[in-house]
Image (cartoon, rainbow, N blue to C red):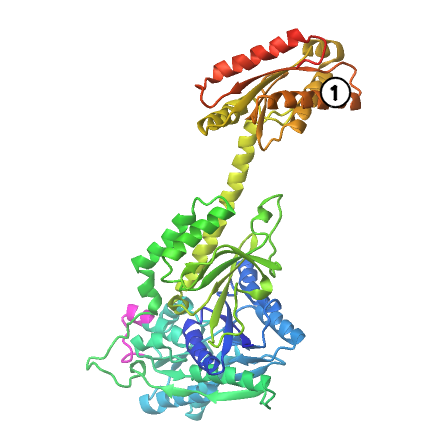
Amino acid sequence: MKRRIAVCGNGWSNEYLEVVLSGIRKCADENNVDVFLLMNYSVGNGEPYKDVGDANIFRLMEFGQFDGVILLANTFHLQEEFDYLRNVIQRKELPTISLEYQMDGIDYLGTDNYPGMYELGTHLVEKHHVKDVLFISGPAGNNESDTRRVALEDVLEKNGLTLKEDYVIYGNWNYFEVQSQLPEWIEAHDKLPDAIVCANDVMAMAACIVLKECGIKVPQDVKVTGFDHLESASDFSIASVDRNWDSLGYQGMQYLLQKLDGEETSASINIDSKMVPGESCGCLVSEPDGMIVMGRLSNYDRYVNNSFWEGHLCDIAECLSNVRTDDELHTSFSAYLEGDHKYEGEEMYVCLMDNFFSSLKGGMSLQDRGYTENMDVICGLKNGVSIGRKHIETDELIPGYDAESDESKIYIFLPLYSKEGGYGYVALGQEVPMMYDYLLYSWMRNIKLVFERVRQNIVMQELNDQLSKLSVTDGLTGVYNRMGCEKVAYPYLKKCHREGKRAVLMFADINKMKVINDKYGHLQGDTAICTVANAIREVLNEEQWIIVRYGGDEFIMIGECTDEQHPVRLLRDISEHLEKAAQQNKLPYQLKVGVGFVLVEPDEELDLSECLKKADDAMYLAKKKQHGEMEV
């Protein structure tokens, strides 16, 4: 049986994720290991329900039978993620390695940030004669960012320089933070720094854009450097530090497999980082007049403006906008994705909690944390073909998982949730390009909104059904009312006639109803009406018969007729049930009904008014003929 390794990480660090996974995947392929990537898009400063919903994907660790875990812990944003994963890893005694972030009690493999930043700082001071440095930091107290700052400060101190406290901006790894804070810093200071040293490439790219907008040339007026050596930063030719992430991923998987094989391993390993020069620091300048580094932030901009992508999301939303039942959701979503899954890939599954639909009834609430023991695979593709709707135990994670396959695979799991609670998860059976340009994030957001709409539609449909049922239901007896006769009974009779089936229309009237009301009161009159209605319902199967309270004490019954004696037998049974009910309830009066019927033959012209009149005449004839006896 193949080994299954869980990898836990955050999708916002998309390029890090892509490069690290390339190393993990390479080692997994060599050793026929399946990789299960549990991924979210938590940010740590959003609404609480988002934090809980995003972190919930890691709770699949309780269900999946994993042999080991790789934590991309430097990408996590939530304390709940650290706390939960540490707890489940220790409780299950799972062999685990954390990449790029040291966690107590868990083996560590990471890049030594210090040598690369020290080399970069030395390069700036010695080759480009930098003296004043503005440092754009990651989050305050972050170990990686602090290490990079210390390395820079050590270089400056060695050369008789200092990093002034007001020359530090906390950009929190974020493009938009830098876009907001850097213009304010420039406006507040009379002199530009010689260089802006950023703790990652994303913030360095943001700094280049801000400087361009301010009319400041890079690198002539200000040099800019980053850290991580992202591919997306190549358009800016950012001087940076390479962290060898592909090697990190490969060695992380290799380390874990060695540990699983019982080989002796070190609990902490570091890989050296190294500087990579670029035009943004003044090296390899290609234009004699200097340059203003421009470029684009990432592939995200290209795709967001891609009308095909926007059209794809709109098509999904439109396809499911009017869904009002679980079967409709399955049918519509499966049909759409089977026809168009160029972004989702050939294998994918939308797995819902098994109470996703039932929770809509009776005011039940969805759970915030964890998953139900079973999942409803409402939509699934395998090799681009719909697998049909399935129910699986959550331990399986995906339907039809092949533990004996000689092909290494990677599966990606993402959380589905809303303010109501957890919906379930989406599983992809392969890496897809939209994982690495933020499109997967927008896809997940769209699916969440679509499923919220579906839930609202289902609730509204149920309310409408209830209102519709109330509008055709008699409040006293629970059978159809006069409107129900028009909307349900007559159409049913027409349907039987259209399909060539013999039908019967019965008309019933309670005998001496006025006497019962006048002598015993209207409450007893209501009891009489309900007793008759119940006797009719006990005899006639309501799945096959339509029963209507046509007036005060009048009833109409319509159903298929097997033979000419069929109605006679039914009337006898109704009378017997009525007699027993009257005795059991100790009614102070004799309760009888007069019933007449008319057979509606399929080869005769259907005239509803005439049918009703014939049944009514037959009923009155029966009452006259057997007055004072069983009036059938």
Q: Where is mark 1, residue-wise?
A: 579
| Quarter of the C terminus within the rendering | top right
Does the image show residue 296?
yes
Does the image show residue 190?
no
The spot of residue 446 in percent (x, y) is 43, 55
Dot 1 amino acid type: Glu
Would residue 466 be counted in the magenta stretch? no
Q: Is residue 448 above or below residue 222?
A: above
Q: Relative to 541, is 50 on the left or the right?
A: left
Mark 1 Cα within 10 Å, few/some/many (few <14, many 20+)? some
- Residue drawn at x 29%, y 82% is 279
446 vs 262, nearest the viewer: 262
Magenta: predominant secondary structure element?
A: loop
Q: Is residue 384 above or below residue 609?
A: below
Residue range corresponding to the magenta coloring: 209-222
The spot of residue 274 in percent (x, y) is 41, 88
The spot of residue 461 in percent (x, y) is 51, 39
The spot of residue 180 in percent (x, y) is 40, 66
| Quarter of the N terminus within the rendering | bottom right
32 vs 145, nearest the viewer: 32
The quarter of the picture where residue 216 lies is: bottom left
Report helix, strand or loop for mark 1. helix
Would residue 214 be counted in the magenta stretch? yes
Q: Relative to 238, is 57 on the left or the right?
A: right
Q: Relative to 217, is 258 on the left or the right?
A: right
458 vs 106, nearest the viewer: 458
Q: Is residue 620 above or below residue 405?
A: above
